[in-house]
Amino acid sequence: MMRLAGLDLGNDSIKLVYEGSQEAVVVPNIVTPGYERHILQEEDAPSKALDVTVYSPSLTQNNRRWFVGQLATELEDNTELEDTDNKALSDQSLIVAITALAFTGLTNPAYSSSSSYSQADEVEFVIGTGLPVRTFAKFREVFEQRLVGDHEVTFHSTPQLKGRKVRVRIRKAVVSIEGAAAIFNLATHDNLQVRDEEIYSGIIGVCEIGALTTDLPVIRRMAIDNHFSYGEQMGLANYLDPILREVEDQFGYSFPSRAKLAQRIKQRDFVIQRIGEGQANIKPIVDLYFTRAAQRVVDLIKKRWKKCPDIQCFYVIGGGAAALKPYLIEAAGPIKLRFVSDSELQNVLGYLKVAKSRMNQGAFAEITQ
Ligand SMILES: Nc1ncnc2c1ncn2[C@@H]1O[C@H](COP(=O)(O)OP(=O)(O)OP(=O)(O)O)[C@@H](O)[C@H]1O
Ligand SMILES: [Mg+2]
């Protein structure tokens, strides 16, 4: 059985959503080399201990063992992506994405087509996915080629999945543009009927703040404006990294990963425990850098709006929008910005809808043109 899924290969986290399911699966985009773990207490969910070997014709390093996602965020030698990485070509992003498709395919029986004659399970997909404005034109084709095909994941110490091997077959990948797909999601219902006439037939500015890129597509009646759409090689990570360094310099405290710091900020838990009995509050450091980030983003938005005064409203989305919201409102002053809930999931929900409309040959397919 083939499944339709939206897959957002975020530099910070991979998001995955299946047709007919409301819940998104989010896996931090982090890997470390894997090894035989000493397990004192088994994790209570597969997502907490993704310990895999991945084979794919698209990878340059094959048949290596990796700890993926949450398991890797705790370890010191993990690799997070840098702003020189291109997600269309990144081995790491592909490893995390294939692992995410494999474990969700195995753990939810509705998604898998268990073939009784073979030990290897197989899961088959058509996926909707996306690339940033700046890489879209040049890398769309190679990205599609890397995704489409047969990949293989073997689980090692992952609870409930030990020793399982699964073939992940991607039949087709429909690639949209980050930020634009999010607007498609906001404009339509799940059945692709128009939900919001203003967005659907208007001229909409978008500022999608990710971890490493910020995309500013302009959408005219659901089509991308080639002339005014634009992307920046900058994201929240450019501000999280100096916060990590500053916390280290001031308090001698190091977070094991950027993701760990982001998690703390999300939970609004700013107190760190220093070695010994001292505690320290890192909120002033976060405020300092987030204020700067917000100022920079608001400058980008103002510039865009000035260049394209037809824009009726500006949506600020992505995980960065959730993180920076109060700072952005402050920096924007009289300029009204629109925020939405589940900001970081808008793209992946949009990718799924775009793929669906393509498969239906629906009326809205032009957003991917
Ligand atoms: N509610 C929140 N509070 C604080 N930080 C957040 C929140 N939500 C997301 N973030 C952080 O915002 C950043 C951007 O998140 P997002 O999920 O949009 O990135 P991504 O899609 O993985 O990256 P990219 O779009 O560059 O590929 C990440 O560093 C993430 O940890
Ligand atoms: Mg993103």
Image (cartoon, rainbow, N blue to C red):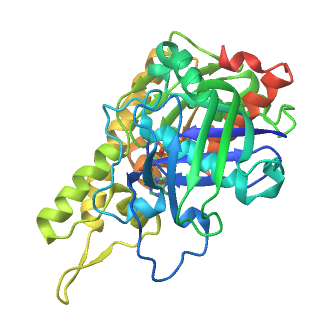
Task: Specify whether 43 is left or right of 245.
Answer: right
Give the quadrant of the N terminus: top right
Q: Note whether 72 is above or below 146 in the view shown.
A: below
Residue 265 horizontal/vertical position (percent) = 40, 64
Q: Residue furthest top?
A: 227
Residue 289 relative to residue 29: left or right: left
User: Can residue 341 be seen in the rendering of this structure?
Assistant: no
Task: Please count the marks in the image.
Answer: 0
Position of 265 with respect to 178 (left or right) is left
Whole-percent x, y for residue 28 in the image: 48, 53
- Horizontally, is 334 left or right of 84 in the view? right
Q: Is residue 183 above or below residue 261?
A: above
Name which quarter of the figure residue 251 lies in: bottom left
Q: Name the residue at 38% across, 38% down.
A: 212
Q: What residue is shown at x 54% (from left), y 18% (from top)?
A: 140
Write the residue at 45% across / 15% down.
Answer: 307
Judging depth in this view, the residue of 291 and 353 nearest the camera is: 353
| Image quadrant in which the C terminus is located | top right
Percent x, y of residue 166: 66, 48
Q: Which of the 4 image quadrants contains residue 317? A: top right
| In the image, residue 266 above or below residue 148 | below
Q: Quadrant of residue 127?
A: top right
303 and 75: which is toward the camera: 75
Decide if residue 139 is in sight here. yes
Q: Position of residue 158 (x, y in %)?
A: 56, 65
